[in-house]
Image: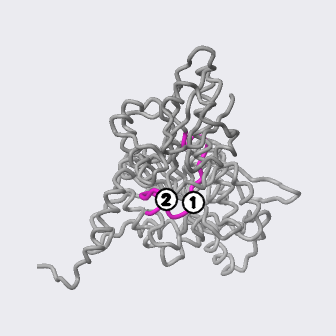
Amino acid sequence: MSNPASDPTPSTTLQYVHWFRHSAPYINAHRGKTFVLMFDGEAVQHDNFQHIIHDIALLHSLGIRLILVHGARPQINHQLNLAKIQTPFYKQRRITTRESLTAVMGAVGSIRLQIEALLSMGLANSPMYGARIDVVSGNFVTAKPYGIHDGIDFQLTGEVRSIDNDAIQRHLDNHNIVLLGPTGYSTTGEVFNLLAEEVATKTAIHLKADKLIFLGKQHGLINLAGQLQREINTAQLDQYIEQYQETQPELALHLHGAKTASTQGVHRVHLISYAYDGALVEELFTRDGSGTMLTDAHYEEVRTANIQDVGGLISLLRPLEQQGILVYRSRERLETEIDQFAVIERDGTILACAALYPIPSQDGEIASAEIACVAVHPSYRKSNRGSQILEYLEQKARSMGIQQLFILTTRTAHWFLEHGFENASVDDLPNARQALYNYQRNSIVCKKSL
């Protein structure tokens, strides 16, 4: 019999059940997907690293295909200090001399063994109990000399030439975790010291990974107001690279990698903290995550709604209808008019919607339509999703030969005025729409010529 004093409180249990239920769509969505996780040498030294290993084991148990890429900068520095060897940096790259290579290889090798040992833990009463994880590392990365830059010979510092995609895929297919370090091998048998960020980025691109995840010191990107940026797009990234170039060069390297990956086919790149317990799980299994997600242009496309979206539309619209901001629409009406709606969806949640209703024309009237039901999820109203969906419907209207758009609103006229609409009156509405105007709501009328 359980001890009541040690049982979780009902509220704690309910919170856990609520979270677990809401994580189910993410568990299903991530199964079978390929994720590249990059963490630097500081992360390996941090007290939270053992928890990160537990979370990696959890992801593996959920069927996620994992490639881990580790850095080794502080470990290499330590080995070089013991050997009393100095290797200067230039533009965040170490100049690797031949005499320093032994220290580099020793540091990288010790980290690999440490990670393999941690992933082999299986003690009873531990998160790793019952986990059977095979970790594979090898000569998957072919490198070439970085060469001479600005007159400086980087010697045995290299850059990625190619990734052995086929070999890595075979190991992933066999349910192994692949472990890569900041070294690569040339066709002549030489070893090169590489940037771990570059290894992770090139691996994610070559394998067409579903996600590239950087674990760094801070939760993600912090704007000038000190606020965490939950989500940004590639176009916004340059300002942050410039901002962190001098103050946090390691983060700047992550951002360079994130931009490169995002522009070359990796649709989602995440920046989270290695110091925050549970950051990886929170980022992947909750809607808003724990850090910053970089999205590309394909991530949240506006699309025409379908019958499966009706439940999500009801969840988004009902609170606004109850506040009197929108006119009530029954489930039956939404199902009937579903083709009129456009939506932006993320991970099964409708983040924004709007509808386009053509207005029947009478003699002498120009082709017109009404945009209605514009709604954005409360958590995303400071984004540009409303503008995206409005632009989508305007383009759709043009393709239909619509020459004039109308909106009727009680609360948001100023927003539509900012988007090119102008004030109008009920008399400006086409006759068919005038007949349906609700004088009790006393909606403001705005129009826009296309």
Residue drawn where x is 85% and y is 60% of the image: 152
The one nearer the camera, 220 or 159, is 220
- Furthest residue to the top? 363
Apparent side of residue 358 relative to residue 183 in the rendered image (left or right): left
Label annotation for residue 93: none
Residue that carries the numbered disc 2 in the rendered image: 288
Please tell me in which quadrant of the rendered image residue 429 appears. top right
Apparent side of residue 244 relative to residue 113 in the rendered image (left or right): right
435 magenta-colored: no
Q: Please give the range of residues in magenta.
A: 282-301
Residue that carries the numbered disc 1 in the rendered image: 230
Residue 18 in percent (x, y) is at: 32, 62
Disc 2/disc 1 C-alpha distance (Å): 7 Å
Tell whether label 1 touches label 2 (CB within 8 Å).
yes
Inspect the image, locate mark 1, and give the three-letter code of the amino acid beneath it.
Arg
- Furthest residue to the bottom? 5
Residue drawn where x is 66% and y is 50% of the image: 259
Residue 110 in percent (x, y) is at: 53, 70
Q: Residues within 10 Å of mark 1 (few under 14, many from 20)?
A: some
Dominant SS of magenta comes to loop
Apparent side of residue 9 relative to residue 286 in the rendered image (left or right): left
**How many marks are shown on the rendered structure?**
2
Say which label, 2 or 1, has the lower sequence index: 1
- Furthest residue to the left? 1
